Image (cartoon, rainbow, N blue to C red):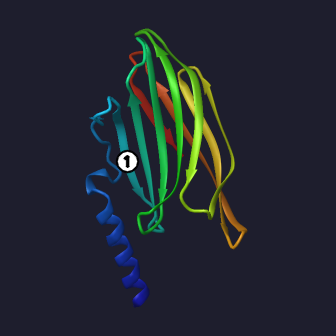
C-alpha cells in the first residue's frame, strides 16, 4: 500500500512541475526575448515516471538565407530533476527553392554523475542534421545499462525548422 502511495506522490510531483498543456502536445512558436523562437516543445511521461523533454529552437539569422537552430532532448528523473541533456545544433542555408545543412554539432551535459556518454557524433546530409549517441548509467561504478538515442533537425526551403527524436 505504501508503495502505491509513493508512486502516486511521485507522479503528482512530476505533474506539478510541468504544465499539463505541454504533455505530448505541440506548442505554438514563442519568442524568447533574445530573438530565438521555440518552434516545438513537448514533454513525454515515461512508464517509470521519468520525463523526456524535447525542445526545438530557431535562432536569429546571422545573415540572409541562413537559419541556425537546435533540438534538445532532456531526461528528468521521477522527481523532475534534469539528469542529462543532449543538444544537436545546426546551420542551414535556404533560398525559397532548396535548403541544405552546412554544419552540425552535438553537445551533451550531465547533472548526475551516474550517467555518462558512451558514444556520440553529429552528421548532416541534404537538409537534415542528425546526432546519434549512447548514454550509459552506472551504480557504484558499475554500468547497469546503456541506451541509444537519435536526434534530427531539418530545415525546409523557406527556413522553417522541424525536429525528431528516438
From the viewer's perspective, is residue 103 above or below residue 113?
above
Q: Is mark 1 on a helix, strand or loop?
A: strand
Outermost residue to the front: 34
- Tell me the residue at 27%/37% (across/down): 28
83 relative to 141 in the view: left or right: left
x%, y% of residue 101?
55, 21
- Tell me the residue at 40%/78% (across/down): 7
Outermost residue to the right: 142
Q: Which is nearer the eye, 144 or 140?
A: 140
- Tell me the residue at 40%/10% (across/down): 96
x%, y% of residue 135?
63, 54
Image quadrant where one finds the N terminus: bottom left
x%, y% of residue 146?
67, 58
- Tell me the residue at 35%/77% (across/down): 8
Q: Place residue 19 in its image quadrant.
A: bottom left
x%, y% of residue 62?
42, 18
From the viewer's perspective, is residue 70 above or below residue 75?
above
Circle 1 sits on which residue?
42
From the viewer's perspective, is residue 160 above or below residue 88?
above
23 relative to 62 in the view: left or right: left
Q: Which is nearer the eye, 30 or 145?
A: 30
135 relative to 58 in the view: left or right: right
Q: How many marks?
A: 1
For mark 1, does the 10 Å Cα neighbourhood hold few (<14), some (14 to 19), or many (20 or more) residues? some
16 relative to 74 in the view: left or right: left
Amino acid at each position: 500500500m505504501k508503495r502505491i502511495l509513493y508512486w502516486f506522490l511521485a507522479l503528482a510531483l512530476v505533474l506539478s512541475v510541468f504544465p499539463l498543456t505541454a504533455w505530448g502536445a505541440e506548442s505554438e512558436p514563442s519568442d524568447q526575448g533574445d530573438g530565438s523562437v521555440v518552434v516545438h516543445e513537448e514533454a513525454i511521461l515515461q512508464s517509470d515516471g521519468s520525463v523526456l523533454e524535447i525542445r526545438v529552437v530557431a535562432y536569429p539569422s546571422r545573415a540572409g538565407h541562413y537559419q541556425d537552430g537546435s533540438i534538445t532532448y532532456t531526461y528528468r528523473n521521477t522527481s523532475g530533476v534534469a539528469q542529462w541533456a543532449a543538444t544537436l545544433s545546426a546551420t542551414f542555408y535556404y533560398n525559397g527553392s532548396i535548403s541544405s545543412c552546412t554544419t552540425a554539432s552535438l553537445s551533451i551535459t550531465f547533472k548526475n554523475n551516474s550517467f555518462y556518454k558512451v558514444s556520440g557524433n553529429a552528421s548532416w546530409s541534404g537538409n537534415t542534421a542528425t546526432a546519434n549517441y549512447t548514454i550509459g548509467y552506472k551504480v557504484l561504478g558499475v554500468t547497469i545499462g546503456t541506451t541509444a538515442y537519435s536526434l534530427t533537425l531539418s530545415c525546409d526551403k523557406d527556413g522553417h525548422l522541424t525536429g525528431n527524436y528516438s
